[in-house]
Image (cartoon, grey):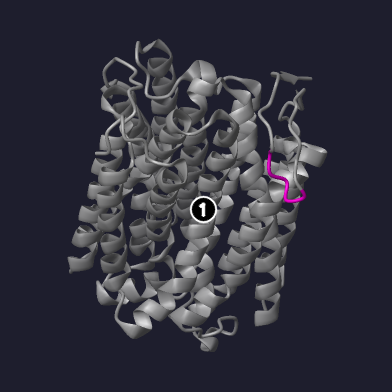
Amino acid sequence: MASETRRTPHQVTFAVLAASTSAYALLQSLVTPVLPTIQADLHTTQNTVTWVLTAYLLSASIFTPIMGRIGDMIGKERVFVVTLAALAAGSLLAALATNVQVMIIARVIQGIGGGVLPLAFGIIRDEFPREKVGAAVGAIASLLAVGSGLGIVLAGPIVNALNYHWLFWLPMIITVITAIAAFILVPESPVRTPGRISWAPAVLLSAWLVALLVALSQAPVWGWGSGRVIGLFAAAVVLAAGWVEVERRAATPLIDMSMMRLPAVWTTNLVALLFGVGMYAMFAFLPEFVQTPKSTGYGFGASVTQSGLILLPLTVTMFLAGLRATALTARIGGKAVVVVGSLVGTAAMAMLAFAHTHTWELYVSMAIMGVGFGLAFAAMSTLIVSAVPAEQTGVASGMNANIRTIGGSIGAALMASVVTASPAADGLPRESGYTNGFAMLAGALLIGAVAAILIPVSRRTSRVEYSSAGEPQAEPAAVTAAE
């Protein structure tokens, strides 16, 4: 790795971190438009193939704090390289998978790549000038969301030119290149946090998430009132409570519960959870909706490429809105921007639920949704950075992104239950399944807007001057107070 004495310009470090985050984000979404193709090729069911997405999100939810903690202990840069190597190894196994079981195992291995987020945030905190930390963290967080949308757009052309296996070969190649670049260019920080991994919290976190997701995904098959489903829900509640208590008592917790209890942190994380439910579930099921045959009376019979292009407006407007979010935050405050973004996202998701007869309606709803998501994600990153001490920037930002991933795994499993609850005679979902599912996601975003109202209003007395683009020109001079 680059030595501490030969400093790498922070612009180069940021480029490596951004490329690595983009590779991880692409793998979150590249497969979603081709789930029907994978389902047919691997001879499985729609409910089972959804686990190709859910397993990835679940694994990332668990490994994000673990890899971040290991990085704090032995060095963020070297663990960053190891995390990218695991992401590449999982991609290789997925590219070679010949059955859905191997594919799901490969996706679990890929989920270790979730560690790039807290590690990247920690590297930024250690290596960048203080006045640039907030903007860099916000940019990485925005790249995660934009990359997820871009993956869906790129999937079709890749599959048409090659085949769906290249959805894993190409990210593997990119990940190997970024791992080598990180090894050579990213300097090793001397900052260490001594301690050890608390495995009990990791096991309990895994257990309650698995119990919850299995219950949500299997409820349509077993019955919502069945003993197995009720038992799994009860187990999830008990295990989650045990997880919180063990984390609270641990000498070196994976997740600092005292930090998580800060009003500005837990409220922003609650919004992130609900946005994760809405965004990832929509990414997973909108392509399936438009690829449904026209013979059903509601589907568009779209190709993989066409279904990806429907999400292109979302990717574009999310990126543009994210760029403008800093300037808007400077004028009306981060809380207000999150509330506005949540309401815009709610309106777009409601339009998707109840106005999806023509393709132009889908394009309009996606463009509007991108504005809401872009504003909210960028503002949430700013709120988290300003709510915690400088030394907790990395872990707090990483957890905010991770909680969004947890929300995504819950949302994907719940959406699968709603969509597949009452299939038609031909085995395909009914239109009402998608309508109810998207309406449920609109409800999640609406609750997110209500939760955003609870975020404490911040007053930051500072010397910061903003350019017309909203970029900070000087370092903040004072603290943030909650009203």
The answer to whether any part of residue 107 appears in the image is: yes
**Which residue is at the far right?**
332
| Left or right for 446, reference 178 | right
Residue receiving disc 1? 143
Give x and y (percent) for residue 429.
49, 72
Q: Which residues are magenta?
A: 468-472
Depth check: give the residue in front, 200 or 78.
78
Q: Is residue 36 left or right of residue 350?
A: left
User: Residue 286: image x %, image y %?
Assistant: 54, 68
Q: Position of residue 384 (x, y in %)?
A: 60, 31
Which residue sits at x=35%, y=15%?
A: 252
Q: Give the total number of marks visible in the rendering.
A: 1
Quarter of the image for residue 126 reads top left
Type of amino acid at the residue the image marks with label 1: Leu
State the image quarter where residue 134 is shown: top right
In the rendered view, would you say 126 is above or below 15? above
Q: Residue at x 23, y 62 (%)?
A: 94
